[in-house]
Image (tube, rainbow, N blue to C red):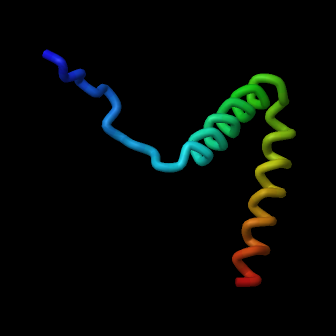
Amino acid sequence: MGCRKRIFKIRIKNDRILGILLVAVGTTIIFVILLPPSVWIVTLGIILIGIGYKLFLC
């Protein structure tokens, strides 16, 4: 009777990672609502070019 049933069994060791993840998800949701789709296509292209460049240098 003194035992509580845990709903979430996942334990995150570093709270900083969880905080960064929550901030990223929150800002993404806000920007999806506010910005038009053409801005998202350009931003996604720039991100993919950056990732490809970093992978090419490795």
Quadrant that contains the C terminus: bottom right
Across and down, in percent, residue 11 comes to 39, 43
Q: Nearer the viewer, residue 29 or 35?
A: 29
Across and down, in percent, residue 29 comes to 69, 29
Q: Nearer the viewer, residue 35 or 18?
A: 18
Establish if 48 lies above or below 19.
below
Image-based side of 14 in relation to 40, left or right:
left
Q: Which residue appears farthest toward the top when viewing the image? A: 1
Which of the 4 image quarters holds residue 23? top right
Which of the 4 image quarters holds residue 31? top right
Q: Residue at x 83, y 48 (%)?
A: 43
Q: Nearer the viewer, residue 42 or 30?
A: 30
Q: Residue at x 53, y 49 (%)?
A: 14
Q: Nearer the viewer, residue 23 or 38?
A: 23
Tell how many labels: 0
Which of the 4 image quarters holds residue 24? top right
Establish if 12 lies above or below 28.
below
Across and down, in percent, residue 54 comes to 75, 74
Q: Residue at x 18, y 18 (%)?
A: 2
Q: Which residue appears farthest toward the left when viewing the image? A: 1
Q: Residue at x 13, y 15 (%)?
A: 1
Across and down, in percent, residue 38 comes to 85, 39
